Image (cartoon, grey):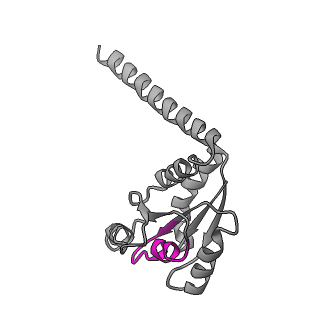
Amino acid sequence: MKVAIVMGSKSDYPVVEKAEGVFKEFGVEFVTRIISAHRTPKQAEEFARNAENDGIEVIIAAAGKAAHLAGVLAGNTPLPVIGLPMKTSDLGGMDSLLSVVQMPKGVPVATVAIGGAENAALLAIQMISIKYPKMREKFKAYKKKMEEDIVALDKQSLAVQG
């Protein structure tokens, strides 16, 4: 199982790095690339067209401002694409979010929150877990631990009030 993270600019890396951390935690192989929909459109098309043959199963596309990367990749591959809108200095990421979620019919892109790299990685893991039962079990364990952690915090906060 292999996931690709494609970012439109090196400046996106501090956010993208959080997705890489999730993949490392789950033992998912990944590749991270810098490919711009606008500055390197030929490379974006080539990457998307070859991704399936390269063993990639899900693509995360992180981009800001006009944020056409997810749509360009989705338009050139049968693989699922997750759009990760990036926070921007101009409009705080709303420009990115709106660019990513408004895909035309026939070019679906799943979208997570602005800067939501961890959720992009977790969604990719959920997608690949359809094919890999061991990954589904790891994801279930992750959800169970998250629940247990919140219950423990709640008990601590009740003890503080009491």
Residue at horizontal 53%, vertical 86%?
A: 39
Q: Is residue 118 placed above or below 86 in the rendered structure? A: above
Q: Is residue 15 left or right of residue 112?
A: right
Quarter of the image for residue 100 reads: bottom left
Q: Is residue 63 left or right of residue 21?
A: left
Which segment did they paint magenta?
61-77
Question: Does the magenta run of residues contain 72?
Answer: yes
- Residue 93, given in percent of the width and then of the height, sits at 36, 67
- Residue 47, given in percent of the width and then of the height, sits at 62, 76
Q: Nearer the viewer, residue 67 or 87?
A: 67
- Residue 125, given in percent of the width and then of the height, sits at 56, 49
Question: From this viewpoint, which residue is outermost toward the top?
Answer: 162
Question: Does the magenta run of residues contain 141?
Answer: no
Q: Nearer the viewer, residue 106 or 25?
A: 106
Where does the N terminus fall, quadrant-wise? bottom right
Where does the C terminus fall, quadrant-wise? top left
Quarter of the image for residue 64 reads: bottom left
Q: Nearer the viewer, residue 45 or 64?
A: 45
Residue at horizontal 44%, vertical 22%?
A: 152
Q: Nearer the viewer, residue 52 or 37?
A: 52
Q: Is residue 25 placed above or below 53 in the rendered structure? A: above
Q: Is residue 137 placed above or below 61 in the rendered structure? A: above
Q: Is residue 5 placed above or below 72 in the rendered structure? A: above
**Total number of numbered labels?**
0
- Residue 86, given in percent of the width and then of the height, sits at 43, 66
